[in-house]
Image: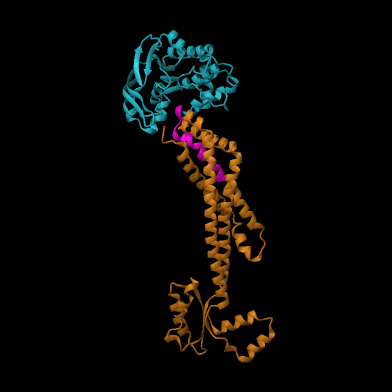
Chain colours: A cyan, B orange
Amino acid sequence: MILLDRVTKTYNKRGSALKSINLHVEPKEFVVIVGQSGAGKSTLLKLLTREEKPSSGKIIVGGIDYSTLKDRKIPYLRRKIGVVFQDFKLLPNKTVFENVAFALEIVGMSNKEIQHTIPKVLEIVGLTGKENSYPSELSGGERQRVAIARAVVRQPKILIADEPTGNLDPKHAWDVIAVLEKINRFGTTVLLTTHNQEIVQKLRRRVVTIQDGQIVSDKAGGRYRR
Amino acid sequence: MKRKLITLRRILIAGIKNFVRNSWLSIAAIAVMVVSIIIILSSIVMNVATQNTISELSKNIKIAVYFLPDTEEDQIFQLKKEFESDSRVAEVTYISSEKAQSDFIESNKTDQKTLQGLALIGADSLPASLQVSVSDLTLINSVADLARQDKYKDYIEDLNVGKQDVQRTIDDATTAQKFITRASIIAASIFVGVSILIIFNTIRMAIFTRQEEIRTEKLLGATRSYIKGPFLVESAIYGIISGIIGSSIVLATVRVISYKDFAYTKDYFSDPKIMALCVLGSILFGILVGYISSSLAIRKYLRLKRW
C-alpha cells in the first residue's frame, strides 16, 4: 500500500529532515510512527500527502509512483488519502455537517448523495445529533472526530493522522484512537504519529520509531522506545 | 458531466459568498471601476457628438464649379464625368442655369425685392454649376485641381472651394475631438490601473483571510480551478456590477441633456441596440479588468504552483 525506498528530504536551511528512509506498509495495516519533535515524522507525512517532494528516493502509494505524478494529478491522489491534523483544521464558520460535506463537495458529489452519506459517517465517529453544531461548540475530542469523519467520508484507502491526540485530554484522546481503530477494522490503512507513550503501549500495533531523520526501530506489536 | 456542473454551481455560490463577505472592500473596488467605465463611456459619447458636429458641418463644404453662360452642356458633363471617376469624390450634382434660377426663386419666394432684382438682371444670370462633395475633407483642394486644368479654364467662371469659416470650425472640432480622445485614454488608463490595484488588493486580502481554508481545501483534494474559481467569480461580480452602474449613469446623463446640438447624440444613444451594446461592453470590460487583477493576485499569493 505504501512504499518508501531510500527517501531523503533535505531542506536548504534545516539540513536533512529524512535520511534514506525505507518503509513498507501493507494494506489494512495500522502503523504508529513515534519520535521526538523534529525527528522527521511530519516531514514523512507531508511526503505522503505530496505537500513536499523528496530530495531523492522513491515513493509509491496505492500503486501511484510519485516520481511520475504530474502536479495537476495531485488533487486526485489526495482524494485517495484521508488526513487528520493535530489542530483539526475545521472551518469555524461551518457546522459539523458542512465541514464533513466540504470534502464531498470538492469532488462534485450531489447534495442528495451528501445528505445520504454524512449521517452514516457521523454515526461511525459517534457524532450523531451534532450535525448542526459549530466547531466552537464542541469539545476537542469531538472536533477531532469531525476531522476524522471529514477524512474518511470519501472512504480513502489510507488515513494519515498527524498527532491527532496532541491537543486532547486522555479520555478524549482514547475516544479518537478508538475511532481510528474502528476505521482500520473497516479495511483502511492507518498511519498514526503520536508522542503519547501510553497510547503506543496499549495499542500493541506496529511501531516505527524515527530519530534524527532515520528509522531506528520498526517492530510489530511494538512499544515506545525512549 | 453532472459532477462538473455541480462543481461549477458551487464555485459560483462560493464566489458570491466571498463577494458578500468582503462587502466593504468590494464597494471600494466597484466605485473605482465605475469611475473608469464612466470616463471611457463619456469619451465615446463625446466622440460621437463631435463626430456628428463635424459631419454636419462637412455637409456645407463642397466644391462649386460655376460655368460661363455660353458653355455647352457636353463640356460641363466632361468635367462631371472626370469628377465622378475620381475615388476621392463622394457625389457630383449638376445644376443647370434654369434649375439654379428656379431654386433661387423657391428659396426667396417671400422676398419680393430679391425676386425683382433677379428679374432686372435677366433670367439667365445664374450660371450652371457642378456641386462636388468629397469623401475626405482634407482632400478637397486636390480634388478641386481637376477643375483647374487648362482644358477647362475657358469654360469656368468661378471655382469655390468650401467656406473658410466652416473649415476652421471643423478643424477646431477635430482638434477638440483628438484632445478629448487623448485625455480620455490617459484618464481611463490611470483609473483602470487604480481599479486593477484595488481589486488585486481585495483578492489578496481574501486569499490571506482564507489561507488556512485554502490549505485544507488543497489537502482534501480540491483542484486548482475549484480553489481559484471563487476568486475569479468574485472579481467578475465587481465587473458586472460596475459595468451596469457605470453604463447606466452615462446613458441616463445623455438622456437628460436637452442641448439642441446634442439631439443627434441623444437619439443615437437612445437606440436600444446601442444602449445594449454600451451596457454589455461595459460589463465585459469590467469582467476583463477584474479577471486580470484577480489572476495577478492569485498567481502571486495563492501559490497554486506549489502543492
Q: Is residue A197 above or below residue A84?
A: above
What is the total number of numbered labels drawn onto the structure image?
A: 0
In this picture, residue B166 sits left or right of residue B228 = right
Q: Estimate the x, y position of residue B292 in percent, counting from the top left.
A: 48, 45
B233 falls in the magenta region: yes
Q: Nearer the viewer, residue B130 or B292?
A: B292
A105 falls in the magenta region: no
Q: Residue drawn at (47%, 38%), measured in percent from left and top? A: B301
Q: Estimate the x, y position of residue A53 in percent, counting from the top left.
A: 36, 29
Q: Quadrant of residue A226?
A: top left
Instruction: For residue B139, say whether it is visible.
Output: yes
Q: Is residue B155 above or below residue B36?
A: below
Q: Nearer the viewer, residue B296 or A13?
A: A13
* Region rendered in magenta: B218-240
Main secondary structure found in the magenta portion: helix
Q: Residue drawn at (60%, 90%), measured in percent from left and top? A: B122
Q: Residue drawn at (51%, 43%), measured in percent from left and top? A: B200
Instruction: For residue A25, say whether it is visible.
Output: no
In this picture, residue B84 sits left or right of residue B281 = left
Q: Is residue A80 above or below residue B72?
A: above
Q: Estimate the x, y position of residue B110 in percent, counting from the top left.
A: 69, 81
Q: Estimate the x, y position of residue B254 in percent, counting from the top left.
A: 63, 58
Q: Quadrant of the N terminus of chain A?
A: top left
